[in-house]
Amino acid sequence: MSGPRSLLFIPANRADMLAKAPSYGADALIFDLEDSVPVAEKPKARVLAREFIGKLKAANRIYVRVNALSTGMLRDDLEAVAVEGLVGIRLAKTESAEDIRTVDAMVAEFEKKRGLAQNSIEISPSLESARGVWFAYEILSASPRVRSVTCGTAQDGDLQTDLGYTWSAEGNEMLYLRSHVLLAARAAGIAHVLDGAYSNVRDPEGLRICCEAARKLGYRGKSVIHPNQIATINRVFAPTPQEIDYYRRVIEAFDAAVARGSAATTVDGKLVDYAMVGMAKRVLAWAQNLTH
């Protein structure tokens, strides 16, 4: 539960933006080598991404979104950025377990070449097609490097284009997509499930609604395309003061019940037993991790 809530995209060909990125307060930074970088600028972006990983690694959680395996550009991306200080790569347009196994082998090669700890670089798949969502479990269980996943829910993005639904902030049309990815992730032992970007940077209310819809399902963070979205995302994807208070009281009440020889009690009229205590501990651990 300790993964980043807000992951800010920065085009890696923009040195000025890379330099400013840490000041915005996102939990993590994603240096982008993919869609926000013109093809002609990708060599420059790789050089800058590597440079700024070195400069910013001490105080920032840094990911790099690399180009899809099918583009033929991925190996050059990894050659540039698989260095000390890189937390992980976001693998664009992941569609199969074979994609993950192929990339895993490439990353392992560069870890060994650079003297990095084995499996130190995470692979975070981005599921942006019907095929990617359909095979989510196979993808997410293909390598121990996979420790998070993003469902590509952005308005007018690849997933919407592939499926043809009409997008809304409330996200009823994406309920199955999000639920399928979440269920697959949990079945694969992955706790940190992320929602795609919110495309309208001038719609804070829509952003809030979109975040809350994903959070209610069990999502724990969201991609960020503008710094003005960070505060909302960080607030929504965290336990509320009311939740923290309630679950603290749940544990206190249960402990008192056990001391009396019982394994069940009530808090605010609701049953509390071992299952509910498990949930309470999960939420409180989540809150605690977010304070560090």
Image: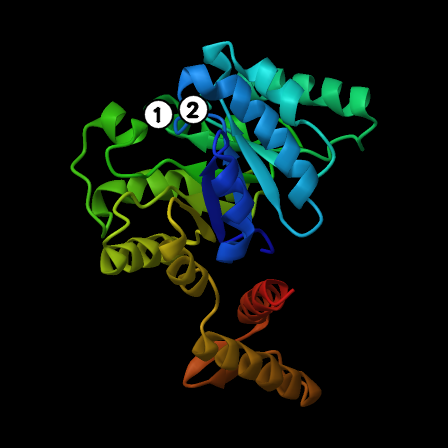
Helix, strand or loop at label 1? It is loop
Seen at 49% across and 26% down, the residue is 33
Whether label 1 touches label 2, CB < 8 Å: yes
Vertical position of residue 250 compared to residue 160: above or below: below
Q: Which residue is mark 1?
A: 129
Q: Quadrant of residue 261?
A: bottom right
Q: Which residue is mark 2?
A: 93
Q: Residue 288: x, y in percent?
A: 62, 68
Asked if residue 73 can be seen in this view, the reply is yes
Q: Residue 234: x, y in percent?
A: 45, 60
Tell me if 189 is positioned left or right of 193 in this view: right
Query: Which disc, if any, is residue 173?
Result: none
Seen at 52% across and 13% down, the residue is 73
Vertical position of residue 16 compared to residue 162: above or below: below
Q: Quadrant of residue 124?
A: top right
Q: Amino acid at mark 1?
A: Ser
Vertical position of residue 174 compared to residue 231: above or below: above
Tell me if 50 is positioned left or right of 5 in this view: right
Seen at 41% across and 62% down, the residue is 231
Asked if residue 184 can be seen in this view, the reply is no
